[in-house]
Image (spheres, rainbow, N blue to C red):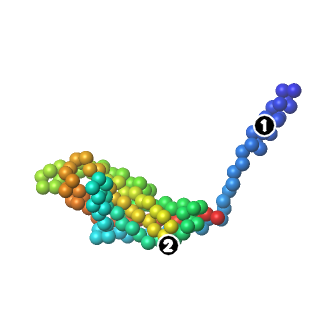
């Protein structure tokens, strides 16, 4: 009896789980260079940050609904060899401006919809006055966007 019950339980254990494998994936990598002058400032009363909207027709409604978009920030080492850091990208920094030392955190992330991708650059705002935020404007950055179309 115990052997029969064990056989039934093992049969249920191995047949109770199902999964679907998607093997037809189409991937595309898009390199994006954002110049320092491309960054816009939100200039809102309570949520200021820099952003850059990129037209991205590769992000179709099908990709948005069934696929995946992953963004990476590209850095270069001392030998000018590129390496990627997946977004969100969070760094802690120290900067001296007019003799004042600022400790802050920068975050680079993104949001997207069908046809567009918005890159965001945020600086922690708890160590300096409101007017000082523009002193922390982002420089040029390179990104790699991987768009995966699911079927």
- Please report the residue visible at 27 percent of the width from the left and 61 percent of the height from the top: 43
Q: Identify whether 57 is placed above or below 88.
A: below
User: Which quarter of the image is occupied by the C terminus?
Assistant: bottom right
- Whether residue 28 is visible, yes or no, is no
Answer with left or right where residue 138 lies relative to residue 56: left
Q: Which residue is mark 2?
A: 57
What count of labels does the image hold?
Answer: 2
- Please report the residue visible at 44 percent of the width from the left and 60 percent of the height from the top: 111
Residue ranking furthest to the top? 1
Q: Position of residue 107 (x, y in %)?
A: 35, 54
- Please report the residue visible at 66 percent of the width from the left and 62 percent of the height from the top: 23
Q: Position of residue 61 (x, y in %)?
A: 55, 67
User: Which quarter of the image is occupied by the N terminus?
Assistant: top right
Cα distance between the residues tagged 2 and 1:
49 Å
Answer with left or right where residue 129 lies relative to residue 54: left
Q: Earlier in the sequence, mark 2 or mark 1?
A: 1
Q: Which residue is mark 1?
A: 10
Q: Position of residue 53 (x, y in %)?
A: 39, 68
- Determine which of the numbered discs, if any, sits on residue 98 in the image: none
């Amino acid at each position: 009896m115990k052997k029969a019950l064990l056989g039934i339980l093992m049969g249920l254990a191995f047949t109770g789980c199902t999964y679907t494998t998607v093997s037809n994936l189409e991937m595309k990598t898009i390199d994006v260079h954002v110049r320092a002058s491309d960054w816009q400032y939100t200039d809102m009363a309570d949520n200021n940050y820099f952003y850059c909207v990129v037209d991205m027709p590769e992000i179709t409604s099908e990709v948005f609904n069934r696929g995946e978009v992953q963004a990476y920030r590209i850095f270069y080492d001392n030998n000018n060899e590129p390496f990627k850091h997946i977004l969100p990208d969070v760094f802690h920094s120290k900067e001296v401006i007019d003799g004042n030392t600022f400790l802050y955190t920068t975050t680079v992330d993104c949001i997207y919809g069908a046809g567009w991708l918005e890159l965001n650059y945020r600086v922690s705002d708890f160590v300096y006055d409101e007017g000082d935020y523009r002193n922390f404007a982002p420089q040029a950055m390179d990104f790699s966007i991987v768009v995966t179309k699911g079927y």
